[in-house]
Image (tube, rainbow, N blue to C red):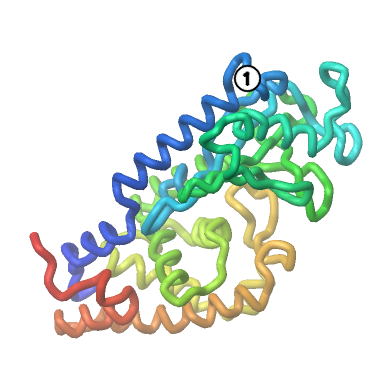
Amino acid sequence: MAHHTLSANFSYFFSRINPSDSFQKTALREHQTITSLIEASYGLASELSPKCFLQGSYKQETAIYTINDVDIVVLCCALNNPIVPGSLGSLYGKNWTRDMIFNTIAAPLLNDGRYRDKVKYHNGSMCIKVDLGIKIEILPVVFKTGNSDPSTEPFRLYRPETQQWEDGYARYHQTWLTLKNQSASGNFIPSIKVLKHLRSRLGLQAVSFHIECLLFRLPDQIFSGSPADYIMNVLSAIASIPAENWYHMTIKTPCDDRDIFTTSEWDYPGWENIHKNVVTWSTVALLANQEANRNKAIEYWQLLLGNDFFPYQVSQ
């Protein structure tokens, strides 16, 4: 266990990296307004029977600093798995293609003066983007063949790079993260935030989804204890295995649908760069954890987390 848990300092740190109430309120307002437009019973998208739900860091409570994007999945309940690539068969006399679906979902926004000039997408887009300062990303999905239950996944989403409809598990992913956080003493979600903070401090490239998947596969006991303990343990667990060895493992997503250590997901140069930094971070966290002198321990944590995020003195 750490010589100094520094509870007040870590409380201050998390208060700094957690989005403020104002960002939460803005995200909630924009989500509710856009959802109501898309789901309107007699609206421009109603023939697809759209049903909206959230995914991403805002929904999963893994966002840091600000909530700069809100991810909305739009399930087109009137459609299911593509019969041929790019087509979803016939509905209302139309042969529904990916482009027709996107255009129909975007229509209520393009018809609204608040959003008309802020909607962006094209035939190579994976989602419809609405830039309101806070960015809204709208992902149209359809039922998989044999399913008509909106609570059952996978759904099917369109991948422009392959021009294929593929399985997606937005809500199941969220459920697995919640369960992991419960079994990991409530410290799994904070650990994701710490790693995202360290990534952002150095401007490193790593997708939040991949960070979540990697930490999800660490044993629950690694996340026990105070932040001074579990931050060190998480970094040490990753650093203790060479980058190349990690990459030769199969690290599945929480839903077991794919391996994150593949060229199409997380390429090796990108992973190797992250791992190299984790080794350094792990060394600093170990020094901070084992330092007997309180002020010196704080200095090590400042070196890792940043002076402005981890001050010497914290108002009680």
Report whether 272 appears left or right of 83.
Answer: left
Query: At which x and y percent is residue 38?
Result: 59, 27
**Residue in front for this viewpoint, 291 or 125:** 125
Q: Residue at x 60, y 73 (%)?
A: 271
Q: Residue at x 40, y 63 (%)?
A: 222
Quarter of the rendering occupied by the C terminus: bottom left
Query: At which x and y percent is residue 153?
Result: 65, 34
| Number of on-image labels | 1
Query: At which x and y percent is residue 33?
Result: 48, 30
Q: Residue at x 69, y 46 (%)?
A: 121
Does residue 150 sit above or below 226 in this rendering? above
Report whether 74 appears left or right of 136.
Answer: right
Residue neighbourhood size for the residue with mark 1, other residues' Cα within 10 Å, grouped as few (<14), some (14–19), many (≥20): some
Is residue 171 at least partly visible in the picture?
no
Q: Residue at x 76, y 43 (%)?
A: 158
Residue named by callout 1: 43
Quarter of the rendering occupied by the N terminus: bottom left
Residue type at mark 1 is Gly
Report whether 74 appears left or right of 9.
Answer: right
Query: At which x and y percent is residue 269?
Result: 66, 78
Is residue 63 at least partly visible in the picture?
yes
Judged from this view, the residue extending furthest toward the left is 316
Judging from the image, what secondary structure is the residue with disc 1 in?
Answer: loop
Judged from this view, the residue extending furthest toward the top is 42
Judged from this view, the residue extending furthest toward the right is 84
Report whether 153 appears left or right of 27.
Answer: right
Location of residue 12 (image quadrant): bottom left
Does residue 52 sit above or below 193 in this rendering? above
